[in-house]
Image (tube, rainbow, N blue to C red):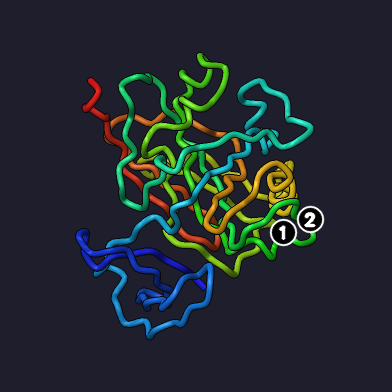
């Protein structure tokens, strides 16, 4: 099932829904609890699609693809390399990625995102799937110059709008070997397969939950393949994951701090 968050217009409150082809039905309840599916009668183009979840935390995994580590002359870690993005980074499909005036070099990072379904701590790898609601596409936007300058990643990864998610959560999805691509203005920038992950989804869920409690709606970004590159004002960036769909966002300079 494809789960969406949407509103009928930009002033209406968010609603949970499910997607059937090009039509949406309302979910009476929450996907993290009991719910009932109403008939899918709303045309997809008639509603405003929102980020599929608003997580309490976004746990990211660095250098989970050897090719990406290599393009930054970095070693693949022995254990998952974790960092956090704040919830204020989240935007949905079609919303603008804002380039902050503090940075002169912002890059895209196409990633598979895991959405957590239920609270868990010390989850065993063989139980990880019981804690996963589904999967969605993500873009771990990064101010690369600030990341390199600071030596730690909070500022370079944490600007508002730096975590596009969407367009929906797919609950029936096998993440073992799917193609991840990133296009900027229609030109291919990244292409890789999840089979090349150093640490699999179930091992990431287990490892992260050994450090912190995972809550319903939390998001894990599983790392990016090689090919990351710059974004500039006026670009359109699309993360496309085989079997999940495409997440597209325009890129704009943020003039408020200039």
Residue 97: quarter of image: top left
Q: Residue furthest bottom?
A: 39
Q: Position of residue 229 (x, y in %)?
A: 47, 30
Label 2 – label 1 distance at C-alpha: 6 Å
Residue 98: quarter of image: top left
Residue 239's place in the image compared with 60, above or below, is below
In the picture, the quarter occupied by the C terminus is: top left
254 or 194, which lies in front?
254
Residue 119's place in the image compared with 108, above or below, is below
Q: Which mark is residue 128?
A: 1
Q: Which mark is residue 124?
A: 2
Residue 212's place in the image compared with 145, above or below, is below
Q: Position of residue 250 (x, y in %)?
A: 31, 42
Q: Residues within 10 Å of mark 1 (few under 14, many from 20)?
A: some
Q: Residue at x 57, y 68 (%)?
A: 171
Q: Position of residue 198 (x, y in %)?
A: 74, 41
* Residue 194 horizontal side relative to residue 189, left or right: right
Q: Residue at x 79, y 60 (%)?
A: 126
Q: Secondary structure at mark 2?
A: loop
Q: Residue at x 69, y 44 (%)?
A: 208
Evaluate if marks 2 and 1 touch, with contact meaning CB atoms under 8 Å apart. Answer: yes
* Residue 231 horizontal side relative to residue 154, left or right: left
Q: Residue furthest top?
A: 149
Q: Residue at x 57, y 45 (%)?
A: 221
Q: Position of residue 154 (x, y in %)?
A: 51, 27
Q: Secondary structure at mark 1?
A: helix
């Amino acid at each position: 099932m494809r789960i969406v968050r949407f509103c009928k217009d930009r002033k209406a409150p968010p609603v949970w829904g499910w997607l059937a082809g090009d039509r949406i039905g309302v979910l009476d309840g929450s996907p993290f609890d009991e719910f009932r599916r109403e008939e899918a009668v709303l045309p997809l183009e008639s509603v405003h699609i929102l980020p599929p979840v608003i997580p309490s935390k976004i746990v990211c995994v660095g250098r989970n693809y050897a090719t990406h580590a290599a393009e930054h002359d970095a070693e693949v870690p022995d254990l998952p390399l974790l960092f956090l993005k704040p919830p204020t980074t989240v935007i949905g499909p079609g919303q603008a990625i804002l380039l902050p005036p503090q940075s002169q070099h912002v890059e895209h990072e196409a990633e598979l995102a895991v959405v957590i379904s239920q609270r868990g701590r010390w989850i065993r790898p063989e139980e990880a799937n019981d804690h996963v609601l589904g999967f969605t596409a993500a873009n771990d936007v990064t101010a690369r110059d600030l990341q390199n300058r600071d030596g730690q990643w909070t500022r370079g990864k944490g600007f508002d709008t730096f975590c596009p998610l969407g367009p929906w959560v797919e609950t029936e999805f096998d993440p073992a070997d799917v193609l991840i691509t990133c296009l900027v203005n229609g030109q291919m920038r990244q292409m890789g397969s999840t089979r090349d992950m150093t640490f699999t989804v179930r091992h990431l869920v287990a490892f992260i939950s050994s450090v912190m409690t995972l809550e319903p709606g939390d998001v894990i970004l599983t790392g990016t393949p090689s090919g990351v590159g710059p974004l500039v004002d006026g670009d359109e960036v699309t993360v496309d994951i085989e079997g999940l769909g495409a997440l597209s966002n325009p890129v704009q300079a943020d003039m408020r701090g200039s």
